[in-house]
Image (cartoon, rainbow, N blue to C red):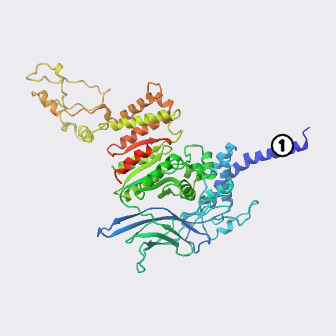
């Protein structure tokens, strides 16, 4: 017989396991339908007549440019980019409680795999809430918190302000998790008119300050460029229906000269682990202290570059992270003492997992093109990592702007290059880059495409085509030149085996010298002119230096990731042909990184 106390303990443990294995997955499975039922169609939304008392305007750091006016070169025009988000705190609705529960489930060290998968599915449908003047009635009761509890940015115990001036205080892990989820469960305020005012460096009281109105979109975001003819100092954004809701931001004026450094954030300056497990990423992002995200080598590199080129080297941070994470990113930048610069994140799509892990190369490319296009007299250095498609994005940028991108630096993320051995694949990648830089005639000459087009023309009549050229015969095989050439033999053609059109008529029977034939014959294309053959040859040779195998396919089976990276490097170098842009892969312990970059920058500063 089992004692009563042991039996009760067993029943309690069984109940806890059943709750963990069944209750959480059921919640995650039903969260999608619950979230979809609470969505509001964009067509039915209207501009609010009033704003909640805790509404906030979050301004994101961008840059401003100065250019000569079109009519007068001495008259300068300042272009001020203003970007931000109008929001208010999220309510403790059933949906938001589920989001917090699912995030906690996913960040537990030892938890059920089925529950984790269900939590991922649930977080994938965590749509952004939208403010409605009647949504105060949607507050639900909970046994652990009062029904009026809100995720207020003004509550230091449960959350933090969503905005550029916010800082997260050190709190217990549950509060840290809620703080960092604050932006995802906040409510956007759509279709609201805002008034933007540009301040002036000049103390002239008679100066008319430039103002402009803008309306937030369906997600509460706004992005506008405001022009003025005086040097601006700061920007003020206020709600037109309630001027007590406003925000200030200093203007970052960047000259159209010198060198700019475009840097990725995740796994480049901040240890995120995008290529790792979803649970590890979520645990690091939502629970770990920001000091654990440091990448000392890159931070030291950036800090020394900024200190030695103060005011002449500008920084632009581009990432696929959503703007909802900006307060946390800003806190990390402050802790790591990274150089100040403009920040360019992406708009939240309503999927927390996808926003954190899935790359958005098209959106990132648009941002890169805008940065380089806004500074036509500026050179750039691009820094990314091997965890995403940074190399391809930067190579495409360099192809679009030849001689504008000085170098592409790719930080090697551990475990991202090979399924077997990162170090050996890295050495072969460096060797490929060096070999391809030394091959001046690696690609076809520019006229090759036009020659091929002239030689093959399927739209023209065969009778109008010129006679085929007779190749030049080697000297050792030549005989006595005949005064009259014999007729060419006719090759019989079988309709059943060959359906090609009949050959063109033979050339006229006349004496033809070898010199005249050699002058008319087209040049022979080299074997390396075929891109696929060249890529395969280079990759196969690199793989054979690593693994003992005879064919490319055997090597690819041994290390698919390594083969893919070697192919990507070859294609990237091919794309960069003629752009004067170099590629360099580096690890965190590279000692000559600062010296190499400083030499590049010193040519233009």
Q: Which residue is mark 1?
A: 10
Q: Residue placed at 44% from the left, 26% from the top? A: 551
**Residue found farthest to the bottom:** 206
| Of the pair 135 and 347, the residue shown nearer to us | 347
Examine the rendering and report whether any part of residue 582 can be seen.
yes
**Residue found farthest to the front:** 308
Q: Tell how many labels.
A: 1
On the picture, is 598 further left or further right than 96? left
Q: Which picture quadrant has residue 532?
A: top left
**Is 379 placed above or below 543 here?**
below
Q: Which picture quadrant has residue 48?
A: bottom right
**Is 2 placed above or below 303 here?**
above
Task: Give x and y (percent) for residue 284.
Answer: 61, 49
| Of the pair 67 and 592, the residue shown nearer to us | 592
Determine whether the residue tagged by mark 1 lies in a helix, strand or loop: helix
Task: Give x and y (percent) for residue 68.
Answer: 32, 66
Task: Give x and y (percent) for residue 449.
Answer: 27, 41
On the picture, is 201 further left or further right than 60? left
**Is 476 placed above or below 85 here?**
above
**Dot 1 alpha-carbon crowd within 10 angstroms: few under 14, some 14 to 19, many 20 or more:** few
| Quadrant for the N terminus in the image | top right
């Amino acid at each position: 017989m089992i004692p009563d106390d042991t039996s009760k303990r067993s029943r309690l443990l069984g109940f806890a396991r059943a709750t963990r294995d069944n209750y959480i997955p059921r919640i995650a499975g039903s969260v999608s339908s619950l979230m979809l039922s609470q969505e509001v169609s964009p067509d039915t939304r209207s501009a609010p007549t009033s704003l909640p008392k805790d509404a906030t305007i979050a301004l994101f750091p961008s840059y401003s440019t100065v250019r000569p006016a079109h009519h007068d070169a001495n008259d300068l025009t300042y272009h001020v980019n203003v970007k931000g988000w109008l929001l208010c705190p999220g309510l403790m609705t059933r949906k938001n409680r589920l989001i917090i529960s699912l995030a906690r489930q996913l960040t537990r060290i030892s938890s059920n795999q089925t529950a984790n998968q269900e939590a991922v599915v649930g977080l994938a449908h965590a749509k952004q809430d939208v403010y409605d003047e009647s949504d105060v009635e949607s507050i639900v009761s909970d046994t652990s918190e009062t029904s009026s509890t809100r995720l207020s940015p003004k509550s230091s115990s449960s959350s933090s302000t969503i905005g550029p001036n916010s800082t997260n205080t050190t709190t217990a892990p549950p509060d840290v998790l809620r703080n960092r989820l604050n932006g995802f469960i906040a409510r956007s305020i759509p279709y609201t008119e805002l008034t933007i005012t540009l301040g002036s460096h000049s103390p002239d009281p008679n100066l008319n300050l430039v103002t402009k109105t803008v309306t937030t979109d369906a997600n509460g975001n706004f992005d506008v460029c405001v022009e003025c003819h005086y040097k601006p100092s700061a920007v003020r954004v206020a709600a037109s229906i309630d001027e007590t809701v406003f925000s200030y931001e200093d203007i970052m004026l960047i000259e159209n000269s010198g060198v700019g450094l475009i840097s990725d954030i995740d796994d480049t300056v901040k240890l995120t682990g995008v290529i790792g497990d979803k649970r590890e990423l979520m645990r690091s992002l939502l629970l770990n202290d920001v000091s654990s995200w440091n990448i000392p080598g890159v931070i030291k590199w950036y800090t020394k570059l900024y200190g030695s080129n103060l005011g002449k080297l500008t920084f632009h941070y581009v990432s696929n992270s959503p703007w909802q994470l900006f307060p946390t990113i800003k806190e990390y930048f402050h802790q790591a003492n990274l150089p100040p610069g403009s920040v360019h994140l992406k708009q939240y799509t309503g999927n927390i997992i996808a926003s954190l892990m899935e790359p958005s190369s098209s959106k990132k490319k648009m941002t890169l093109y805008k940065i380089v296009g806004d500074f036509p007299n500026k050179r750039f250095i691009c820094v990314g990592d091997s965890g995403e498609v940074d190399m391809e994005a930067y190579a495409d940028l360099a192809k679009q702007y030849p001689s504008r991108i000085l170098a592409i630096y790719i930080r090697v993320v551990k475990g991202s290059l090979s399924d077997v051995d990162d170090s050996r694949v890295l050495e072969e990648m460096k060797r490929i880059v060096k070999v391809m830089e030394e091959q001046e005639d690696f690609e076809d000459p520019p006229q090759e495409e036009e020659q091929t087009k002239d030689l093959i023309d399927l739209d023209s009549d065969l009778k109008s085509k010129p006679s085929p050229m007779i190749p030049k015969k080697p000297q050792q095989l030549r005989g006595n030149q005949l005064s009259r050439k014999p007729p060419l033999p006719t090759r019989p053609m079988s309709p059943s085996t060959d359906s090609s059109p009949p050959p063109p008529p033979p050339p006229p029977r006349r004496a033809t010298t070898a010199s005249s034939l050699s002058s008319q014959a087209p040049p022979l294309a080299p074997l390396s002119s075929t891109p696929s053959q060249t890529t395969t040859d280079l990759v196969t040779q690199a793989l054979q230096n690593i693994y003992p195998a005879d064919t490319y396919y055997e090597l690819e089976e041994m290390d698919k990731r390594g083969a893919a990276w070697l192919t990507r490097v070859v294609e990237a170098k091919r794309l960069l042909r003629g752009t004067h842009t170099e590629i360099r892969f580096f690890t965190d312990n590279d000692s000559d990184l600062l010296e190499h970059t400083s030499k590049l920058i010193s040519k233009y500063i």
